[in-house]
Image (cartoon, rainbow, N blue to C red):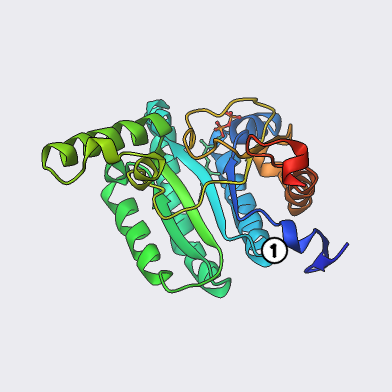
Amino acid sequence: MTKIANIDLDPTRIPRHVAIIMDGNGRWAKRHGLARMFGHKQGVTTVHQITETAAEIGIEYLTLYAFSTENWNRPKEEVDALMSLLVDTIAKETPTLMKNNVRLQTIGDTDRLPELARQRFEECIAQTADNTGLNLVLALSYSSRWELTHAMREMAHDIQAGQLRQECIDEETISAYLTTRNIPDPDLLIRTSGELRISNFLLWQLAYAELYFTDCLWPDFTKEEFIAALQDYQHRERRFGKTSEQVQ
Ligand code: FPP
């Protein structure tokens, strides 16, 4: 097998878009007798490693579920600490993104983020806008049901305003009203920590994604674990509803 950056992967079958539900920070902290925030801090190290690996391998899009709409319901101290961690991480990691030619984007209801976090993300998005390598998409204050509700409201508004014709609505129209409008659908979804759920993440976009679940907790998810997920993906046959013979 040909190697990419000395990694056993088939360069012709690299997923274009990998989405990850980073789960298990709290349990990792508990196992180490630490407060939950230590798990999130360790999780940032994993984010750094996996982003670098994705860039190295030539993945085009990496979407990380960093904060869900439902996460706003966590205790206030944890929400505040997570927001501070995001702000600090963006400040610290922007040079790494530049060095690795990574372009940052966000999806989600980012208007709900504290002013400072919103500002920092906007600055980083502007600074990395011309980078041409990996697109790192952070889902922040994101949930699929929020996104679909928002999209349906916008579509209803545009129909009323005479800018959209009801009979012209097709799958492409719907995709264009989602916050992922310029992003291809994920080819592979990874969820860490042994939970077998999608948890309101990219429900429309994951229609044909391959799913990969691992018991590994997010802070323990190494480059090797990531490559194992990609190798597993490369052995899947993607049929998109067709027969095996049709796709061979
Ligand atoms: C899930 O673990 C993780 C989160 C809700 C937050 C993810 C955030 C990070 C990894 C840090 C910041 C990210 C970026 C992109 C800089 P959990 O708390 O639900 O774990 P548990 O299920 O074990 O309690």
Answer above or below: position of 116 versus 243: below
Which class describes the residues within 10 Å of circle 1: few (<14), some (14-19), or many (20+)? some
- Horizontal side of 126 relative to 203 (left or right) equals left
Question: Looking at the picture, how far across and down is residue 194, in whole percent?
Answer: 69, 28
Residue 193, visible in the rendered structure = yes
Name the secondary structure under disc 1.
Answer: helix
Answer above or below: position of 145 versus 245: above
Disc 1: which residue: 57
Residue in the picture at 45% in, 61% down: 104
Report if the beta carbon of the residue with label 1 is closer than 8 angstroms to ligand 1: no
User: Would you identify the image quadrant in which residue 11 lies?
Assistant: bottom right
- Horizontal side of 95 relative to 55 (left or right) equals left
Q: Amino acid at mark 1?
A: Ile
User: Would you identify the image quadrant in which residue 32 lies?
Assistant: top right
- Horizontal side of 161 relative to 172 (left or right) equals left
Front residue of 118/126: it is: 126
As drawn, which residue projects farthest toward the right? 1
